[in-house]
Image (cartoon, grey):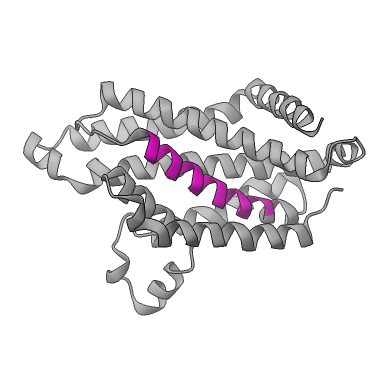
């Protein structure tokens, strides 16, 4: 009974999401466009030997696009939960036979499915339009991105728990999440940062997400990134525990 309710609610949430064009474009289309436009704009200016050796084009840009997929999913989740709370939908859902955990799990499943679908589009588009021939371990990289999204979604639940209204949900989420890119090691090696910023980078989840995604994209074994997976799991555990304390249904 619980699984049937979870399946039905998940399907309803997918249909609701796809009915909103702006949400679908922001979560699915924009990361793919960023990947292709930046790849062709930067790659078109480099000779082929330099292009193949360029670490950012070969690894950094795909990881950036993948993280944009994850963060877009989180911001979408924060907005939807806030709208549902403000409109009284969460309160009505909680009054149904569905358990609160089932309701929240349905939202997580929707975002993970959309993340996997968007990554598939990114890889398919990349094979045709991306300037560098990259042979990525697609299954392993998809799992790594889903772990990343799963971890960051827990931060989204904390944000959704404390934002006052739906109007402020996405801006506050963006202010919290996007600055993490600068200290994640994606653009500047963490070792080259000042000591204070290095210490801050080590507690940010995107630091471990970048390291995991870059390694898996490059073909590293999972055993080389057990610490990154453990750090992302710890983020999920801490944020989930916190959100259960502060989450408001109405």
Whether residue 151 is in magenta: the answer is: yes
Residue 26 seen anywhere in this rendered image of the structure? no
The quadrant of the picture occupied by the N terminus is: top right
Specify whether 218 is left or right of 16.
left
Name the residue rendered at 38%, 72% in the picture.
Answer: 198
For the image, the number of numbered tags is 0
Q: Identify the residue at the far right of this view.
A: 95
Q: Where is residue 250? Give x, y as percent.
A: 87, 48
Does the magenta-highlighted stretch encompass residue 97?
no
Residue in front for this viewpoint, 165 or 215: 215
- In the rendered image, the vertical position of residue 184 relative to residue 130, given as above or below: below
Measured as percent of width and height from the top left, residue 239 is found at 64, 60
Left or right position of 12 against 201: right
Predominant secondary structure, magenta span: helix
**48 or 141: nearer the viewer:** 141
- Within the image, what quadrant is residue 81 found in? top right
The image quadrant of residue 236 is: bottom right
On screen, residue 198 above or below 46: below
Residue 243 left/right relative to 49:
right
- Describe residue 27's horizontal placement relative to residue 61 as left or right: right
The answer to whether residue 75 is visible is yes
State the residue at coordinates (48%, 63%).
Answer: 204
> What's drawn in magenta, residue-wise?
139-157
**Image spot of residue 112 (x, y percent):** 56, 37
Q: Nearer the viewer, residue 126 or 39?
A: 126
Q: Residue at x 15, y 36 (%)?
A: 45
């Amino acid at each position: 009974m619980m699984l049937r309710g979870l399946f039905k609610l998940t399907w309803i949430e997918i249909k609701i999401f796809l009915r909103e064009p702006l949400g679908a474009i922001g979560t699915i289309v924009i990361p793919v466009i960023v990947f292709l436009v930046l790849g062709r704009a930067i790659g078109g200016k480099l000779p082929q030997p330099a292009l193949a050796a360029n670490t950012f084009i070969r690894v950094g840009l795909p990881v950036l696009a993948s993280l944009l997929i994850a963060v877009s999913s989180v911001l979408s989740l924060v907005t939807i939960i806030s709208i549902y709370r403000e409109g009284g939908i969460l309160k009505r859902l909680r009054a149904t036979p569905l358990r609160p955990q089932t309701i929240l799990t349905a939202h997580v499943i929707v975002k993970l499915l959309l993340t996997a679908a968007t990554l598939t589009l990114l890889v398919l588009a990349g094979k045709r339009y991306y300037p560098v021939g990259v042979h990525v371990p697609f299954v392993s990289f998809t799992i790594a991105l889903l772990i990343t999204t799963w971890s960051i979604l827990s931060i989204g639940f904390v944000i959704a728990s404390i934002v006052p209204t739906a109007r402020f949900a996405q801006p506050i989420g963006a202010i919290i999440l996007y600055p993490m890119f600068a200290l994640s090691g994606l653009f500047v090696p963490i070792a080259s940062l000042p000591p204070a910023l290095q210490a801050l980078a080590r507690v940010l989840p995107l630091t471990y997400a970048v390291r995991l995604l870059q390694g898996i994209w490059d073909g590293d074994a999972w055993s080389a990134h057990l610490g990154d997976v453990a750090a992302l799991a710890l983020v999920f555990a801490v944020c989930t525990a916190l959100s259960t304390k502060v989450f408001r249904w109405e």
